[in-house]
Amino acid sequence: MSDSVERVLLLTGELSFRGSSILTMRLASGLESRGIEAIVLCTRAQPLDPNLTRGVKIIRVPGYTVPVWGRVVRRTVLNQLEEQPPDVIHVQGPKMLPQALWLGRTLDRPVVLSLTDQGEATRVLLSTPNSLCRAIICVSESVRAALPSRLDQIEQRVILPGVPLDLDRKVPPIFQEDRVPVIGMAGPLEVIKGGSFFLRACHRVLDSGVKIRIVVTGSGPEERNLRRLATSLELDKQVTFVDDSTAMSAYLTAIDIFCLPSLQQGFGVIMLEAMALGRPAIASGVGGILSILEDNVNGLVVPPSDSRALADRMLELLNDHSLAHRIAVAGQKLVEEKFTADRMVEETLALYQDIHQKGSSAKTIPMESRTSTKQS
């Protein structure tokens, strides 16, 4: 086995238009750009922005988590990996952890676990000590704090999420004089993402006499209800629903204000993508949002499920473009300083190298030396 990491398996469930999937693809792309082969193994993949998937090898394995059928599927996956096994198996979230540990045990490879919210942290089931899971990556200190104390023996690192940042790229300015302002939200269309509160807030803004256009990007079980709500609020002429396979930068640069009205939120990766493009953000003060945004400094924070408060903050930015520009610049600077994809990839790769080298060192110790060490 090589002294350095050359091949990484990223194991995840469904790849979809949500922050965790975007981070997985950003990491895979970043590894590939550094000459490290990255393979993404998923149970299902929805259509995604082609810029996220370009150049990344994705293996779709339906049934991988099904108990009976899963045994057959696992053997098929193993046959694909045995000839060129990965140096590290990196599993995204606790749901696929049993499959990752099985692969790690069978291929004799270390496992790294990533967690994106406090709920995931509390659901980690690992026997301790566990020699296969060598490290746990958390997106924030609050997520690490939620880990059970019995996991303290496993190395834990906080690696902040990262998004691309190209300050030299020509991005259209916000609030162009020749068009109506656009307010948008993006992400999986689920009840917990607060789309109904977003549409009601937009309705309040229109009722105040301020003209806006509305963009809702994504898909999911709540899409039909949101379309019906838009019709009942008579927003049909103002709202556009955009498919989530569209290039992310295309719709994020088309909006003037980005909203994240979630009732619960792990971290807000798509919001970071918008901030990186110089879009001011308004978000619910829940979960990891409070570790990113400082109200009235680099974003605006509102209570969850409060369409009136959300509408008021929208109007603040619509009526005060200098405030919107100031917040947008501060948000972009925050991303540049703390949340770049390059920094995320480098820190993750450093962790891979650490555990890989420790594993290589352990294997060079003669068996009799290990035995005598244990006896002493």
Image (tube, grey):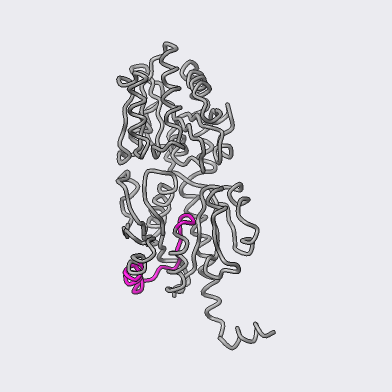
Q: Is residue 94 magenta?
A: yes
Quarter location, residue 289:
top right
Position in image of residue 63 (x %, y %): 33, 60
Q: Tell me where the magenta segment starts and ends, as one range.
A: 74-95
Position in image of residue 28 (x %, y %): 40, 55
Residue in the picture at 32% in, 22% down: 231
Query: Which of these two is toward me, 30 or 197?
Result: 197
Position in image of residue 86 (x %, y %): 41, 68
Query: Which of these two is toward me, 346 or 303?
Result: 303
Q: Looking at this rendering, what residue extends furthest in the right direction?
A: 376
Q: Looking at this rendering, what residue extends furthest in the top direction?
A: 209
Residue in the picture at 42% in, 52% down: 24
Above or below, 157 relative to 198: below
Q: Looking at this rendering, what residue extends furthest in the bottom direction?
A: 368
Query: Which of these two is toward me, 329 or 75?
Result: 75
Q: Quadrant of the C terminus?
A: bottom right
Position in image of residue 318 (x %, y %): 46, 18
Q: Quadrant of the N terminus?
A: bottom left
Q: Is residue 290 magenta?
A: no
Residue 26 located left or right of residue 324: left
Above or below, 313 relative to 268: above
